[in-house]
Image: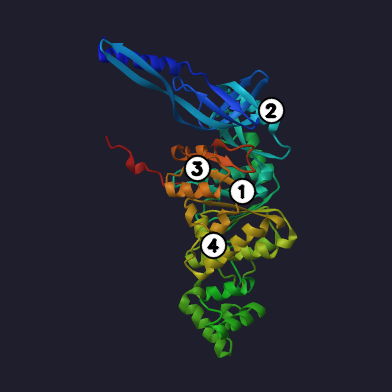
Amino acid sequence: MTLDERTADFRALRRQIEESILPLATSVDGRRFEVQSSLYGLALEAGGYVVLESEDGARLGQVVTLELASVEGSELTADEGAVSLRARMTIRIARGEGVVLGGDGRPFHDAIARPADDAEVARWLDAARPEHAMLEIGSLLLAPAVPASLDAAGFDRHTFLCGQSGSGKTYSLGVMLERLLLETDLRLVVLDPNSDYVRLAALRPGVAEDEAVRYAEATRGVVVRRAGDGLRLRLRELQPATRAAVLDLDPVADREEFALVDELLGEHGMTLEELTVSEDPAARALRLRAANLGVSAWDIWARDRAESVVEDVEQRRERCLVVDLGSLPTQGEQSTAAAAVLEALWRRRADREPTLIVVDEAHNVCPQEPEDPVTALASEQAVRIAAEGRKFGLYLLVSTQRPQKVHENVLTQCDNLVLMRVNSRADLAHLAEAFSFVPDGLLGRVPAFRQGEALVAGKIASHPTFVRFRERIAEEGGADVPAGWARSRR
């Protein structure tokens, strides 16, 4: 027999052994298990559901890690005349770990692990369903016939939503806001830098009639404040530090002007226009400063008009307030409006009214390294709410495509994660450290997500799982520009 023939026999024997490996799971605590399986016809996958069948019954489990492993087999020998051939066979298997989702907590040994069908997953979810409102956001990615729902009560913890451009982050956040409006009474305040949620109350064509009626009723309390339509501020409504920052005043280097601003614009409630007619030279100097900085030309000032977005926040006039920061023409106005809204929410914290504060494009509103004094103050307010807001009923939902740019003390206070496609290894490592309760094996699948797919973990989910978001009910306010220019001309 030639060497090639012996090699072929060797490979055939190894394959025969590898194909005969049973998919077995073992648990020493009844909560976590180790699993092995043949690589041939492999039906297990990270994040997938399995039924673990042993002598004392069946349990539902979820595989969280799965990788290639090698096991050293016996040494094989063959004599070919005067030559003795020796080789050690290496057996390749799939080996992983998982968590037991359904069971009695008893350990088990050599349970047969087979893929669970959608009905078995659905039964477990129904049995584990809490009494709180559930927000049906789509379907389970690895059990497509099973609805994916978030526990509404889980939003009493801060939530972090992340996904790179094109992952469907903005669209998916809209789905969650719609379900919160439909299924809960939670108050929403949305800081909207890109005007993505200004049509939150506008029905998309084709929505089923019964759902359209429910949604129209639920969105009666949605109010959008935009430039020229209610998105205005009064200087006296800002905190002293914010007023000074708007006018580029340092409390030490410009201590006299700083004190004057606090007196005239704060205590006396004067407007920038009223400073012009004042006989006080210092007041006129402040007016010139505001004009030279361009601040007096901002359209955001209420001047003699009654409307103020701060009053909307403090008087709780609406169920859902969308602050259209994207409608403001300058970065200074956007930062000032964001700071004012966050200040107003914190100022009324003693009211203890449960409020979800949605901060889209959070890397601009509460960055790790603010580029100007006003943004720095807005970031400080977000950090304060992240650290202490929960006990007053103030909950954050921050969304970004740049997780490393968001202030660390906001990110690390979040207990819920909704993670869409992220390709950057540095960003994934950063998120893995911040959300260490999410299994690494599940995070490893994130770069392969398609648009609208996400990993959900934390109090809002019964277990870390993959989901595919459903269609929106409302129209999308800031959809991408259509790529019709790429259509073939042939």
Q: Secondary structure at mark 3?
A: loop
Crowding at dot 2, Cα within 10 Å, few <14 / some 14-19 / many 20+, comes out as few
x, y percentage for residue 451? 47, 39
Crowding at dot 1, Cα within 10 Å, few <14 / some 14-19 / many 20+, comes out as many
* Label 3 or label 4, whichever comes before in sequence order: 4
Q: Is residue 118 above or below residue 297?
A: above
Q: How is the image coloured?
A: rainbow
**Residue at mark 2:** 106
Q: Is residue 188 visible?
A: yes
**Residue at mark 3:** 420
Depth-wise, is mark 2 or mark 1 nearer the camera? 2
Front-most of 451 and 218? 451
**Residue at mark 1:** 415
Q: Secondary structure at mark 1?
A: loop
Identify the amino acid type marked 2.
Answer: Arg
Q: Is residue 431 above or below residue 48?
A: below
> Position of 267 compared to 5: left or right?
right
Residue at mark 4 to residue at mark 1: CA–CA distance = 34 Å
Q: Quadrant of residue 176?
A: top right
Q: Secondary structure at mark 4?
A: loop
Identify the amino acid type marked 1.
Answer: Asp
Residue at mark 2 to residue at mark 3: CA–CA distance = 35 Å
* Label 4 or label 2, whichever comes before in sequence order: 2
